[in-house]
Image (cartoon, rainbow, N blue to C red):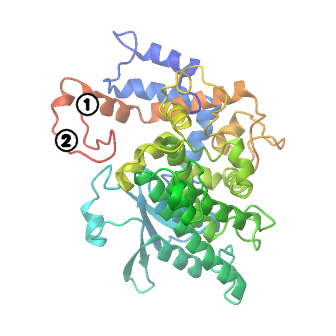
């Protein structure tokens, strides 16, 4: 989304590193050639910043990242907790757990495990968690015993209890003595399940059109032209919007100026609702129309998108419409047909512009600049100024940022990521060749999932 074309530096490096052929082919696994590309990428200011950030992450420091394996947050002791979460960042339950860990800054080890839809779980994990459920939390006690806990809500509540405010950790729940606060929390938790149920009904079942006619009148409904499922989903979303609008800030509770437990519980599935509703129903909940209809919801989403830890785990619409069916089942086309067709073409790059170079500065369907569009270290290295006047700052939008600087930083980061993973990319792409096509491989539910690809 941020400009997949290579920078001039990387293009020159590719030309100089080729041997008898004029350029590297996708089937090349020449280690030296990829190393030269990686070196060229690291020679840029953006590449050097990403190298430093990568080293910091290995040591348990640095910024939030979907594939971090250790988070220390200043602790000098080896964490006694290990979270097992999905490798690709597809699992919404793993996402909300990681958001709690990042915002509360809980020292923890992290092990990455494939979901069934795109890979086989290691036997060592299945011996520990026979159900294969993710996330899973391994707890080491002071006497050396180990215990495994599953179910994201249980894990999140225990992590919160074990890291109290008295020990310097952020408050994530209303105080137990706050009866009204706990009542509101429980009501919101039930509302999240109600919204999830309506979403499943809308997306994963064929729509029954219209709440009008005799039956609609009997039920007290007007003929809106919407399906019962669409109307039910939007009505429930209005309740969520009212709950958010009832507080003085963007979050569900006023006791903190940061997101808390219930915000995390909502956001991982709301993120998937945005993508799926646009793609299968033509319902763009971030459009100006729905920003006016759901101002509380959109202010809440805007606030999340200004936080680095949320952006580290947030995905794009294309990824979501591909990762949702293997987990939940197929989505059904319906809703607002003209808008749906337009959004589907945009998300899949079939509209002739969304995936065509040169790319537009922003994406009308999924705006990129309401928060930091790249890692903060990249924005700082590139000298990109946020709308608050600070270079590479968090908590601000970047809608007024220099588009030329942004495009160059994006190309440099894309080149750095590709060069650093070049051999795996070449290996994966080579499976389509005359030799790779003969490799017997196991099928998985997710499109293009092929963990056993070989040239």
Q: Earlier in the sequence, mark 1 or mark 2?
A: 1
In this rendering, position of residue 445 left or right of residue 218 = left
Q: Quadrant of the C terminus?
A: top left
Q: Are marks 1 and 2 in contact (CB under 8 Å)?
A: yes
Q: Which image quadrant for residue 259?
A: bottom right
What x and y, as percent, mark residue 145? 37, 83
The residue shown at (35%, 10%) is: 21
Say which residue label 1 marks.
431
Taking 33 as reference, is 374 above or below it? below
Label placed on residue 441: 2
What x and y, as percent, mark residue 193? 52, 69
In this rendering, position of residue 126 left or right of residue 322 = left
What x and y, as percent, mark residue 415? 52, 29
Q: Secondary structure at mark 1?
A: helix
What x and y, as percent, mark residue 80? 47, 74
Front residue of 222/60: it is 222
View extreme (right): residue: 389
The residue shown at (23%, 24%) is: 433
In this rendering, position of residue 319 left or right of residue 191 = left
The residue shown at (58%, 77%) is: 160
């Amino acid at each position: 989304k941020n400009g997949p074309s290579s920078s001039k530096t990387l293009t020159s490096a590719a030309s100089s590193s080729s041997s008898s052929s004029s350029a590297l082919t996708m089937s090349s696994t020449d280690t030296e050639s990829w190393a030269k590309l990686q070196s060229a990428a690291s020679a840029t200011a953006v590449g050097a910043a990403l190298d430093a950030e990568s080293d910091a992450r290995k040591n348990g420091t640095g910024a939030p990242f979907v594939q971090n394996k250790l988070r220390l947050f200043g602790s000098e002791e080896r964490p006694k907790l290990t979270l097992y979460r999905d490798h690709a960042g597809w699992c919404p339950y793993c996402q909300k757990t990681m958001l709690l860990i990042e915002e509360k800054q809980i020292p923890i080890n992290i092990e990455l495990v494939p979901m069934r839809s795109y890979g086989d779980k290691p036997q060592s994990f299945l011996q520990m968690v026979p159900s294969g459920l993710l996330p899973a939390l391994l707890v080491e006690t002071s006497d050396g015993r180990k215990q495994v806990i599953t179910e994201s809500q249980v894990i999140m509540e225990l992590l919160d209890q074990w890291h109290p405010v008295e020990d310097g950790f952020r408050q994530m729940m209303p105080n137990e003595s706050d009866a009204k606060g706990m009542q509101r929390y429980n009501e919101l938790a039930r509302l999240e399940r109600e919204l999830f149920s309506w979403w499943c009904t809308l997306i994963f079942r064929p729509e029954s059109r219209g709440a009008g006619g005799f039956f609609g009148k009997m039920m007290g409904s007007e003929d809106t032209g919407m399906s019962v499922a669409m109307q039910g989903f939007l009505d429930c979303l209005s309740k969520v919007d009212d709950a958010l609008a009832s507080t003085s800030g963007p979050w569900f509770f006023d006791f903190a100026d940061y997101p808390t437990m219930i915000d995390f519980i909502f956001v991982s599935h709301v993120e998937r609702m945005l993508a799926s509703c646009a793609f299968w129903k033509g319902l763009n909940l971030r459009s100006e129309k729905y920003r006016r209809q759901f101002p509380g919801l959109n202010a809440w989403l805007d606030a999340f998108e200004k936080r680095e830890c949320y952006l580290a785990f947030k995905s794009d619409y294309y990824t979501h419409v591909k990762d949702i069916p293997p987990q939940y089942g197929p989505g059904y086309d319906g809703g607002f047909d003209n808008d749906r067709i337009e959004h589907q073409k945009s998300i899949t790059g079939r509209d002739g512009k969304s995936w065509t170079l040169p790319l537009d500065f922003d994406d009308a369907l999924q705006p990129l600049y309401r928060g930091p569009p790249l890692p903060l270290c990249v924005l700082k290295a590139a000298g990109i100024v946020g709308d608050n006047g600070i270079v590479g700052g968090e908590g601000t939008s970047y809608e007024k940022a220099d588009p030329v600087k942004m495009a160059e930083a994006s190309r440099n980061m894309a080149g750095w990521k590709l060069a650093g993973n070049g051999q795996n990319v070449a290996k994966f792409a080579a499976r389509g060749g005359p030799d790779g096509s003969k490799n017997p491989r196991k099928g998985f539910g997710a499109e293009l999932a092929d963990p056993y690809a070989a040239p």
